[in-house]
Amino acid sequence: MKEYELVHEIFNQCSGNQMRDVDFREIETDDPRAWVENFLRSHKSVEISEDAFTPGTVIFDVTADGLHERFSFTEI
């Protein structure tokens, strides 16, 4: 399995407040998208878009039950 540093951001929906919740963790997975889908399995509505900006980094922008979240996976 590959090791990743995961940065999970939850964006604040309040206008005028640009702060966000940020969580850092190290995980092991062979499929980052499957990991995100499993993490969000309790949500009723999930939309996922995937971007690979640089080699070794995959970013998933997610709308889960109307809340914008971002999962950034960087290989360790």
Image (spheres, grey):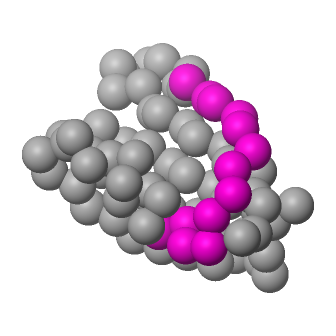
Q: Position of residue 49 (x, y in %)?
A: 40, 70
Q: Position of residue 37 (x, y in %)?
A: 36, 59
Residue 62 visible in the current orientation: no
Q: Position of 34 compared to 21: left or right?
A: left
Q: Residue at x 62, y 29 (%)?
A: 22
- Decide whether residue 5 is among the magenta residues: no
- Decide whether residue 28 is among the magenta residues: yes
In terms of secondary structure, what is the magenta stretch mainly? strand
Q: In this view, does 61 lie above or below 16?
A: below
Q: Where is residue 48 in the image (x, y as percent from the top left)?
A: 34, 64
Q: Where is residue 32 in the image (x, y as percent from the top left)?
A: 55, 66
What range of the chain is rendered magenta? 21-33
Q: Position of 31 compared to 13: left or right?
A: right
Residue 24 visible in the current orientation: yes
Which of 67/29 is in front? 29
Q: Which residue is drawn at 75% across and 58% down?
A: 4
Q: Identify the image quadrant of residue 64.
A: top left
Quadrant placement of the C terminus: bottom right
Q: Residue at x 72, y 70 (%)?
A: 1
